[in-house]
Structures are given as C-alpha cells and as structure tokens.
Amino acid sequence: MNSFGTLYRVTLYGESHQKAIGIVIDGMPAGIKVDHELIEKDLMKRKPRELGTTKRIEPDMYQITSGVFNGYTTGSPIHVMIENLDTQSKDYENLIHHPRPGHADFVSQHKYKGFQDYRGGGRFSGRLTAPLVIAGSFAKMMLPYTLSHDLIQVGECKDLSKLDEYLEDIIAKKESVGGIIELKVIGVDPGLGEPFFGKVESLVGQMLFSIPAVKGVEFGIGFKGIDLLGSKFNDCIISEDGKTKTNHSGGINGGITNGNDLIIRVFMKPASSVGVNQDTYHFKHQKVESLKIEGRHDAAIVRRAGIVLENAVAIVLADLFLQQKAYQ
C-alpha cells in the first residue's frame, strides 16, 4: 500500500505532476533537534546536477506543517510537503493509448481502469523519492549509525574517472544505462530484526524494491558467494563483541544484525524512457507502431539514486531500532 513500518511509519503520497508530493512520518520520538542542513544536503545529492541526469529541475523547497515546534520534534506525526513546479504534462498525452515499454503505463491502465494520473509516470515516478529522502533524513537524526553509499559501476563503465566520457556516448545514442550502488552502515547494534518474516534482509529488500528502477539487491558477498565452500563463506568470530574476520554475510545472521557493518549492493536498471524509437503496441490503432518518447529523462539515473537508497535503508533501521528499544 502507501505506508511502511511499525514504530517508525511513513506514508507516502502524491504523483509526479500533481500540485504537491509529500510524506507523513509517524513514530518520531519527541525532543529530536531537526537538522535542516542534513535534509537540504541529502536533497541536494538527489538533484540532477551531473551529466546523464534529467533536465527537470525542481527546487524541492519542503514545508513541514506539523510535528515540529521551536526546532524540535514534538512526538506527533510529521507532515512534509514538496510542491511540483517544473512539469511538462503535454509530453505524456500520447501515451494513453501507446504505453511505453519498460514503464508502468500498461499495468496501471489495467489496475486503475484508466483513472490513474499518467503524467510523468504518476504514482510510479521517481519524483516520489524526494519525500522518501526527507523521511530518511529524519531517521538519521535519531540513529547512532553512520550510513554511506558509493557508485560502483555504470553500464559497462567500471573506471568512474571516465564516466562522463562514457555517458557522452550513451547520450549521443539517445540511450540509457543502469548501474550498481553499494550501501554501508557502520556501528549497527547486534540484535536488530526478527527470524523469518521480520528479517533485516526481508525488510530492507521490501523497502529497496519499492524504489523505481531497482531490480536487484544483495547482501555481503552476494551472488559471488557461489564460488566459496561453506568453510570459506562462514564469517569466523574473532572477539567477544561479535566482530568477524570476514563479512561475507554483510552484517546479518539469521535475519538479525550481528554488529558488523551492513553491506548492501543494489542494481538499478536503465531508465525506460529513451530517445530511440521503439516498436510497441498501440491499443487504439490495434497494431504495433513506432513510439517516440518525449520529455526530460535520465540517461543514468543511478548517478543521483544513491542518497535515495541510503535514506530508504535508514527508514528501515529506524523502525528496527525503535522496536529493539521497545523490547528492552
């Protein structure tokens, strides 16, 4: 649905071209000093500033309308709203009968019987990740952990010092590419999570797969673990606080954090909107026709997605952190 979490619960609302998007954060403890510098810094990381990112430039001026007083959280639900100001809805009118391949146009038409807001991808747009970033910023204000992200690979480019040169060729071809981002969380307490349905991997995976374009999530060594025998895959404990010699499991055993760093890698697919004409079905004309997609889109959306993934993980950890405190 539209909400995630138990004790730190977020409800996301809005569509890409509606007047506003936003989020309601429920469960934020009272007395936390609101770090506006952190929020603005995180939002800036999401902005399209580099080669290969969209020309849709939103100011992302957020408004906190409840839950904060005199610079501190009050303990009541926090509502944050962001206006959509830089929209070009006319670019999407031809997609009503000619859905874009790779997008949610076709499935949303079926699910919502034509009543969906199709402009800019509507509810399925990456635009909705802006308020998600803010909810993650609030989560980080109360977490005693250090979160970070690194871009590992973009398309075939592994030498990121040559990334702009590589993307110039992609842009010239009117194409897009995906990428891999690595997330790290340092200082995590042992004991977060529950066996089976409340596993850390399950909850983090659920949150990350909610983000548009995410197609793969792995923890620790991930799929490369296929090359290791059990004795080599195992992380031997070397101290009484649970520190391990290796970290193939990515800081999690049995779905519960073990005190080592959380290591998560995420694959984001190439943006589906490309400038290359694509032959796909036209439902009104009842035949396959060439589709040219208009609008402003990312050739490498992965360049600005790291902070979205990082803050999404922060939301999950905030919920688990508060649950652990409640049990204690």
Image (tube, rainbow, N blue to C red):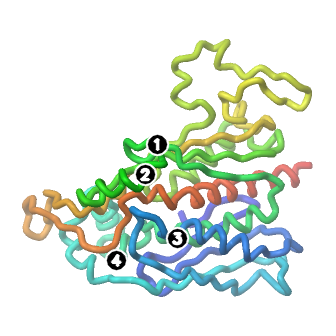
Residue that carries the numbered disc 1 in the rendered image: 159
Disc 4 to disc 2, how far (Cα)?
A: 31 Å
Determine the secondary structure under disc 4. helix
Query: Residue, x 80% and y 58% (percent of image)?
Result: 143
- First in sequence, mark 2 or 3: give its number: 3
- First in sequence, mark 1 or 3: give its number: 3
Q: Is residue 92 above or below residue 254?
A: below
Q: Could you tell me if the residues under marks 2 and 3 are in contact, i.e. CB atoms within 8 Å?
A: no
Q: Amino acid at mark 3?
A: Lys
Determine the secondary structure under disc 1. loop
Q: Is residue 44 above or below residue 155?
A: below
Disc 4 to disc 1, how far (Cα)?
A: 36 Å
Disc marking residue 163? 2
Disc 1 to disc 2, how far (Cα)?
A: 7 Å
Q: Could you tell me if the residues under marks 1 and 3 are in contact, i.e. CB atoms within 8 Å?
A: no
Disc 1 to disc 3, how far (Cα)?
A: 23 Å
Q: Could you tell me if the residues under marks 1 and 2 are in contact, i.e. CB atoms within 8 Å?
A: yes
Residue that carries the numbered disc 4 in the rendered image: 119
Q: Splitting the image into 4 quarters, where does residue 105 fall?
A: bottom left
Q: Amino acid at mark 4?
A: Arg
Q: Splitting the image into 4 quarters, where does residue 132 fall?
A: bottom right
- First in sequence, mark 3 or 4: give its number: 3
Q: Amino acid at mark 2?
A: Leu
Query: Residue, x 54% and y 49% (percent of image)?
Result: 151
Horizontal and vertical percent position of residue 88: 33, 83
